[in-house]
Image (tube, rainbow, N blue to C red):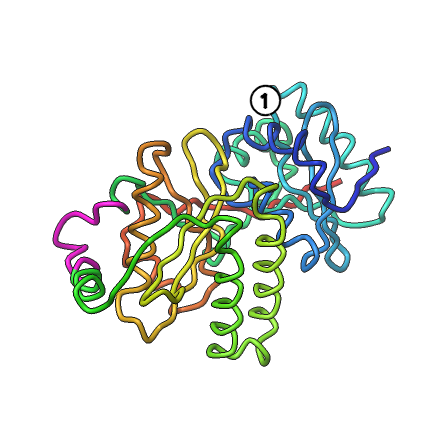
């Protein structure tokens, strides 16, 4: 019988290597993301048969992420861990659901369970994946407007860029509070949840191994961003915030941070749009290399 637990920093030493080894590119496989958001979504996890497995409960469903570990393509090993997950689900009396499964995971599930699975994708949860070098350079005619906004920012403001460190995290937190005030966090449940997640990440920034950068104008932080590697090829951007009244701040922080990543990673995952029209338009405007399709999978018992 599996024993799931709430996320804790000390688990990163065993959990992160398993998540990293799977080589999945989706945002669900960054330990720092799990740690930031577990309180909002009731995420728990455990280690089973050499795999990292996570679970949350939503109504009559037990929702598991596809197991992660170095043997992720070994169908025999996967069958053993899925037997344990199904046993756990039966003990809970819930419907068995796999969430956030990409095409690679879906193919493995088809090989394991054939017609016993039902797959449904949801466009709102597709991850936007970009070429790291292209985000750093913004080349071509399609990126002309981005470069114009950046040029305006560079010419108009007395700006500087710096990596996020222990010393400047208080400045980021102050900017986050003001951003929330300006954007109505007090009346938006989703923004309140995000606000708490950002504060949690900054509280344990160094221990989580997060990487980020900030923009200052006349010494004041006007934008910041941070994230974590998911695999050897993918970096996941967890958060990006900027004051909207500084024209060009968003493309500027995006570009400057991408410059620091382009020599280490092929791709930058900028996560989902959650069905928000403005966010979808903004993410598409950067011309993603691919939309990482993700399925919700139900398995008949």
Is residue 138 in the magenta section? yes
> Foreground residue, 190 or 250?
250
Vertical comparison of 135 with 115: above or below = below
Residue positioned 43% across, 54% down in the render: 225
Query: Residue 68 appears at what percent x and percent y?
Result: 61, 31
Secondary structure under tag 1 reads loop
| Residue that protrudes farthest toward the left in the picture | 141
Quadrant assignment, res 132: top left
Residue 201 relative to residue 262: left or right: right
Residue positioned 52% across, 56% down in the render: 169
Work out which quarter of the rendered image holds the N terminus and state it: top right
Asked if one can make out residue 46 in the rendered structure from this viewpoint, the answer is yes
Q: Which residue is mark 1?
A: 70
Residue positioned 63% across, 56% down in the render: 200
Query: Residue 10 appears at what percent x and percent y?
Result: 72, 37
Query: Residue 234 appears at what percent x and percent y?
Result: 43, 36
Is residue 127 in the magenta section? no
Q: Classify mark 1: residues with Cα within 10 Å, few (<14), some (14-19) or many (20+).
A: some
Asked if one can make out residue 127 in the rendered structure from this viewpoint, the answer is no
Work out which quarter of the rendered image holds the C terminus and state it: top right
Residue 128 relative to residue 15: left or right: left
Quadrant assignment, res 149: bottom left
Residue 267 relative to residue 70: left or right: left
Vertical comparison of 142 with 64: above or below = below
> Foreground residue, 23 or 150?
150
Where does the magenta region start and end?
Answer: 136-147
Magenta-colored segment: predominant secondary structure: helix
How many dots with numbers?
1
> Foreground residue, 168 or 178?
168
Query: Residue 278 appears at what percent x and percent y?
Result: 38, 69
Residue positioned 68% across, 46% down in the render: 97
């Amino acid at each position: 019988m599996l024993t799931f637990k709430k996320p804790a920093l000390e688990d990163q030493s065993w959990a992160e290597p398993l998540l990293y080894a799977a080589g999945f590119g989706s945002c669900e496989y960054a330990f720092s993301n799990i740690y930031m958001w577990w309180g909002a979504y009731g995420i728990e996890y455990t280690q089973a048969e050499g795999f990292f497995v996570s679970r949350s409960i939503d109504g009559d469903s037990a929702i598991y992420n596809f197991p992660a570990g170095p043997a992720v393509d070994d169908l025999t090993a996967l069958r053993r861990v899925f037997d344990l997950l199904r046993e756990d689900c039966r003990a809970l009396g819930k419907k068995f659901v796999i969430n956030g499964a990409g095409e690679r995971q879906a193919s493995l599930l088809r090989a394991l369970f054939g017609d016993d699975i039902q797959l449904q994708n949801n466009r709102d949860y597709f991850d936007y994946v970009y070429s790291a070098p292209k985000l750093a350079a913004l080349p071509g005619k399609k990126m002309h407007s981005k470069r114009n906004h950046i040029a305006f920012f560079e010419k108009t403001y007395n700006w500087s860029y710096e990596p996020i460190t222990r010393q400047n995290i208080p400045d980021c937190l102050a900017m986050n509070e003001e951003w929330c005030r300006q954007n109505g966090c007090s009346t938006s449940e989703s923004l309140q949840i995000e606000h708490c997640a950002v504060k949690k990440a900054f509280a344990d920034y160094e221990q989580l191994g997060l990487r980020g950068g900030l923009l200052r104008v006349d010494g004041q932080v006007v934008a910041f961003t941070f994230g974590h590697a998911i695999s050897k090829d993918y970096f996941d951007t967890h958060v990006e915030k900027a004051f909207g009244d500084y024209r060009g701040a968003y493309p500027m922080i995006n570009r400057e941070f991408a410059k620091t990543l382009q020599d280490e990673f092929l791709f930058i995952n900028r996560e989902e749009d959650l069905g928000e029209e403005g966010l979808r338009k903004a993410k598409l405007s950067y011309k993603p290399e691919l939309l990482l399709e993700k399925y919700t999978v139900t398995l008949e018992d």
